[in-house]
């Protein structure tokens, strides 16, 4: 077997980069560990958690109108009056009594018939369901953002390893050229060419280091953990077949599960109930009232008297005229309902376009990865063949440098295609509305630390 010098250098570079990044810090972070950290620290997700907690109260608020309302009232007041009454001699006599009035009452009101209250209850359920569906979308968004940040950082790390390997290979090539030139077996041009390539590689290496730091800092902000090193993709990268190979099957799933469509449906249900609330302005309302009260010297006529009173009754309210407000509010609610309906249709169309895009990308990315893997294999053999040709005098030093760069570019493109493939799988499932933690575990399988 022909020894691949560049591969040996690359393995050394991977080890060197791992030591450079992880020395004195925590060990490499896996994807599932990053997810656990993001659940606790990602501010966007935590905001969604608080929003969902608030959304849970819509149903309780709507139900409150159907339940009894109980009130307790207490009054204590000082009174001073002027009371004129006929005296014993028939002449009017004025007195100025001062007394304290005390009253206690407890009352219960229960809605028996109120269309607005019933509509409020149904709307509260729709709004809570909307909040729940929206939260599912926020969780899926967290998974997608996390994997995107993780793969970008891992790809930047891979780039650093490749560039370190390229720099070391060029440095070794330069030393070999210098030695050959010293003994008259090489040319000054070979030394200069290799040195120029080495300078460019060193500059690219500095840029890659900066990009990696930025990518790791982004991941650190999401997870709340000091991220300094990530495990790369497994060498044995095996593509898994799509769960469903027919696009129409994905369409059916998306119609029932896509978060944007589902939230749109709940928004439409809420808008329908808003119309019912408006129409209720023309409907009668019936309420049961129960009251128990006790008072002492409540009025001047009951001065120094205690009284107890109980009452139970039904109150009927029939709206007759409200200045046209009910009709105007109803028309406004209907127009808002139509807007929500058309927005839902537009959203459904956009979801189907995105679903088709990701479905096609998932299929084409497999072919692209196969082609790029062949490109890497061919570039690897080409580097070895070019080196042998240089020894035989058929090729020159510049040919070796060019083939090495081709190999680096091929490996970079293959790594990028693999990361893109993982993202496409998640985006496809998110468009279908079925992205979950299980899919995150599937992606984590492709990283070394997750086995």
Image (spheres, grey):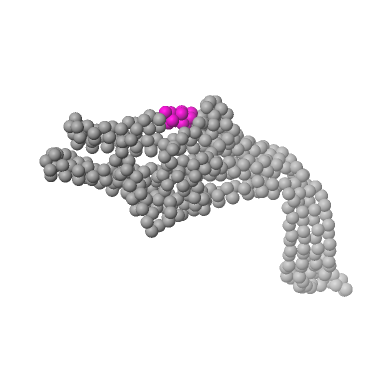
Front residue (pair 96, 222): 222
Q: Quadrant of the N terminus?
A: top left
Q: Furthest residue to the front?
A: 1
- Total numbered labels: 0
In the picture, measured across the screen, residue 187 lies left or right of residue 86, that is left
Q: Main secondary structure of the magenta part?
A: helix
What's the residue at 66%, 37% (across, down)? 276
What's the residue at 74%, 69% (across, down)? 79
Q: Furthest residue to the right?
A: 88
Residue 246 percent location from the top left of the image: 53, 25
Q: Which residues are magenta?
A: 356-367
Q: Is residue 369 above or below residue 105?
A: above
Residue 41 percent location from the top left of the image: 49, 53
In the picture, measured across the screen, residue 186 lies left or right of residue 449, that is left
Q: Is residue 378 above or below residue 135?
A: above
Front residue (pair 260, 109): 260
Front residue (pair 62, 16): 16
Q: Is residue 191 visible?
A: no
Q: Furthest residue to the left?
A: 184
What's the residue at 35%, 47% (across, down)? 14
Residue 358 located within the stretch drawn in magenta: yes
Residue 20 percent location from the top left of the image: 34, 53
Residue 69 located within the stretch drawn in magenta: no
Q: Quadrant of residue 385?
A: top left
Q: Quadrant of residue 194?
A: top left
Q: Is residue 171 visible?
A: yes
What's the residue at 13%, 44% (across, down)? 182
């Amino acid at each position: 077997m022909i020894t691949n010098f560049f591969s040996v250098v690359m393995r050394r570079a991977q080890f060197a980069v791992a030591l450079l990044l992880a020395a004195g810090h925590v060990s490499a972070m896996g994807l599932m560990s990053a997810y656990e950290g993001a659940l606790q620290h990602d501010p966007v997700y935590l905001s969604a958690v608080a929003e969902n907690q608030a959304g849970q109260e819509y149903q309780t608020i709507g139900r409150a109108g159907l339940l009894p309302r109980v009130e307790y009232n207490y009054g204590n007041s000082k009174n001073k009056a002027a009371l004129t009454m006929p005296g014993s001699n028939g002449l009017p006599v004025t007195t100025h009594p001062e007394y304290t009035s005390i009253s206690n009452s407890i009352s219960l009101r229960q809605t028996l018939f109120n269309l607005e209250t019933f509509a409020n209850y149904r709307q509260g359920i729709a709004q809570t369901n909307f909040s729940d569906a929206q939260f599912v979308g926020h969780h899926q968004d967290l998974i997608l953002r996390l994997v995107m940040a993780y793969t970008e950082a891992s790809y930047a790390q891979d780039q650093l390893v490749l560039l370190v390997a390229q720099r070391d290979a060029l440095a070794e090539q330069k030393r070999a050229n210098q030695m050959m030139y010293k003994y008259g077996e090489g040319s000054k041009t070979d030394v200069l060419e290799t040195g120029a390539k080495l300078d460019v590689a060193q500059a690219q290496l500095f840029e890659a280091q900066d990009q990696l730091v930025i990518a790791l800092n982004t991941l650190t902000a999401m997870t709340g953990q000091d991220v300094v090193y990530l495990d790369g993709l497994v060498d044995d990268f095996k593509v898994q077949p799509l769960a469903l190979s027919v696009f129409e099957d994905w369409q059916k799933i998306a119609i029932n599960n896509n978060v944007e469509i589902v939230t749109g449906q709940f928004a439409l249900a809420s808008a329908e109930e808003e119309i019912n609330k408006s129409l209720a302005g023309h409907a009668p309302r019936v309420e049961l009232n129960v009251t128990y009260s006790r008072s002492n010297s409540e009025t001047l006529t009951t001065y120094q008297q205690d009284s107890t009173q109980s009452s139970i009754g039904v109150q009927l309210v029939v709206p007759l005229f409200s200045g046209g407000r009910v009709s105007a509010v109803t028309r406004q609610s209907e127009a808002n309902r139509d807007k929500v309906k058309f927005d839902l249709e537009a959203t459904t169309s956009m979801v189907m376009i995105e679903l088709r895009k990701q479905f096609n990308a998932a299929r084409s990315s497999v072919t692209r990865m196969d082609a790029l893997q062949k490109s890497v294999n061919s570039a690897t053999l080409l580097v070895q063949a070019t080196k042998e040709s240089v020894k035989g005098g058929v090729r020159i030093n510049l040919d070796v440098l060019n083939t090495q760069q081709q190999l680096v570019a091929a490996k970079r493109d293959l790594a990028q295609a693999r990361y893109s493939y993982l993202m496409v799988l998640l985006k496809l499932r998110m468009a279908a509305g079925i992205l979950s933690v299980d899919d995150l575990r599937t992606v984590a399988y492709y990283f070394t630390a997750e086995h």
